[in-house]
Amino acid sequence: MASSAAAVVAEAEGEEVTNRQVILKRYVTGCPTVDDMEVVAGAVRLAVPPGSAAVLVKNLYLSCDPFMRTRMTRHSEPGFVPDYVPGKVLDTCNVSKVVLSGHPDFKPGDLLWGVTGWEEYSLIPNPVFCHRINHHEFPLSYYTGVLVGKAKKGEYVFVSAAAGAVGQIVGQLAKLTGCYVVGSAGSDHKVNLLKTKFGFDDAFNYKKELDLNAALKRCFPHGIDVHFENVGGAMLDAVLRNMRPRGRIAVCGQVSQYNLERPDGVDLFQLVGKHIRMEGFLVSEYAGEYYRRFEEEMARYLKEGKVVYVEEVAEGIEAAPAALVGLFAGRNVGKQVVAVARE
Amino acid sequence: MASSAAAVVAEAEGEEVTNRQVILKRYVTGCPTVDDMEVVAGAVRLAVPPGSAAVLVKNLYLSCDPFMRTRMTRHSEPGFVPDYVPGKVLDTCNVSKVVLSGHPDFKPGDLLWGVTGWEEYSLIPNPVFCHRINHHEFPLSYYTGVLVGKAKKGEYVFVSAAAGAVGQIVGQLAKLTGCYVVGSAGSDHKVNLLKTKFGFDDAFNYKKELDLNAALKRCFPHGIDVHFENVGGAMLDAVLRNMRPRGRIAVCGQVSQYNLERPDGVDLFQLVGKHIRMEGFLVSEYAGEYYRRFEEEMARYLKEGKVVYVEEVAEGIEAAPAALVGLFAGRNVGKQVVAVARE
């Protein structure tokens, strides 16, 4: 079906075609459900405004990101990305293919990585934040996280949500750097993958640990130098207690906190006693400077088998709401994407 | 009385004299009270072990520090400084005078800044972490905090607990750097001092603000570049919401959290979206490198009237427990010390 649609595009410039979209139905409280979203059939004209620099793309892979949850709540003040709006299409940083282009840097057939809607076709008025890509298997977030943590050879590195989209790559890059790497995940299957497929030195199932502090002590008798932080709450609190002096925490996400009305408390006084640095980061800050370098390096690692990569692919845009909701139940192993079309 | 005791010392080497001590009576839950401590009359022999490098000091000023509270709870694992032990004397970083010395770097009459007990006389077996001082009016913590925050000219700086021991100096040093400086404090009297005596650009009484977020928005319509963090909890949460991209938070203390069984939650996901760096620090890490520079610079500022300094002096060791407890009620303006002796 996707490929026949693509064939239509080539022959139907100027025509109006169906454009299915995933919209937010209502602001979310607590854990999101599929009923908070809806797949609706909109329409799009296969054209870019004459004289504009817009590009029309066909979305291939939609990225399911836990932090989308934070945009489903209405905030009284603006965050770093706008809240989603009920009745409007969701968006994330997706992989798409250029159908029509008014921009000199992009031509039909180019693969792009950039913000597009959760829909079959997106019109990007100004593709300034789009990157033409050769490899669409890996988001830049993997790379930037490693840069922020500044893990050095021989250091002790802990990755929470280690079998997720970002964690799997962060851990492997830390191993390539020569670190001792331990990850946590939410099932025995994932823990097994970490230790075998991804080459972590050790891993534990946080759902089976009665005491996260004790689990970290067991895995890190000498403490943690660098923590790649995806989770927040009780896990972060236990990590803080096990950090070594001058440790660094690269804050990528806080997935355990997104569905809460009030955040869990963690003992931030630990920062003082051990001179810990905790630093957040966003992919977008690094994209311009590092994207090409990242792409080349990662392509080489993948080709050489030094990094392996797992993704969970949901088929078709109708599957998108359930794929997103599944993130919070830990259903995905590795990166969760939705394949809207294959080409 | 203090001076007559000093006279006795000079003539009584080898004698045993009374040594009043403030001991912890029991581990503390919630807010500390004077009944959690006790002043007992011990004894000390005015001598240092022959052939040792020990020094015997007479304590002049005891430093009352909010973080002492964290040491009054029994922890299952060691922190950066040991917990206090019931029945044993409290200690902090105090100002003392050398009575007898077996160490070549120190001689009788030298003023020292370093860890000693809350008692009249302390024997320091190895005075390696003691600094000989010329000016005992200001602790090094003021200086190190400013270094960590890396505030630059023209930046917006917020100081919580700004009329406290550390805040008063941090704010004035930020002003000297050319920053726009706002402080919060817990009484109108303190707020008035911040705006008049300490030269802050603005200040507010957090107890009178219904909405800390709104208060910060009013004072910082463009947001906060550097926050000097003394408080934690709801104040820190509001600060995080008002930080500018690439903002820095120097974590000195978390005074609102020390009496709680479980820490308050703050929205740490804010770190991610704005790439905020949050970094704890300890005076002791900087003491070796910066103490002399700090002392010279601060002495000059005080002499030139560029920095003013307020302290609250409680008289006599018997007043020490109440002085400490008073910190948590916000009774002190500026640095709270206990004058055990004047010379």
Image (cartoon, coloured by chain):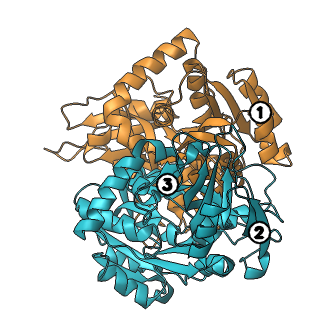
Chain colours: A orange, B cyan
Callout in the foreground (2, 1): 2
Whole-angstrom CA distance, mark 1 to mark 3, is 48 Å
- Could you tell me the amino acid type at mark 3? Asp
Same chain assignment for discs 3 and 2: yes
State yes or no: discs 1 and 3 in contact (Cβ < 8 Å).
Answer: no
Q: At which x and y percent is residue B254? A: 57, 65
Q: At which x and y percent is residue B23? A: 77, 69
Residue identifier under label 1: A219
Q: Which residue is depicted at the point 47% across and 17% down? A: A299
Query: Height in image: B250 above or below B287?
Result: below
- Could you tell me the amino acid type at mark 2? Ile
Residue identifier under label 2: B23
Q: Which residue is depicted at the point 57% across and 61% down? A: B94
Could you tell me if residue A265 is visible in this image?
no
Instruction: Give the camera-side residue of A319 and A202.
Output: A202
- Could you tell me the amino acid type at mark 1? Cys
Q: At which x and y percent is residue A28? A: 59, 66
Query: Height in image: B134 above or below A320?
Result: below
State yes or no: discs 3 and 2 in contact (Cβ < 8 Å).
Answer: no
Q: At which x and y percent is residue B170? A: 38, 64
Whole-angstrom CA distance, mark 3 to mark 2, is 27 Å
Residue A228 found in image quarter: top right
Image quarter where the C terminus of chain A lies is top left
Instruction: Give the camera-side residue of B26 and B270.
Output: B26
Could you tell me if residue B40 is visible in this image?
yes
Query: Height in image: A225 above or below B47?
Result: above
Q: Which residue is depicted at the point 57% across and 18% down? A: A176
Residue identifier under label 3: B110
Callout in the foreground (1, 3): 3
Same chain assignment for discs 1 and 3: no
- Residue reaching furthest to the left: A51
Secondary-structure class at tag 2: strand
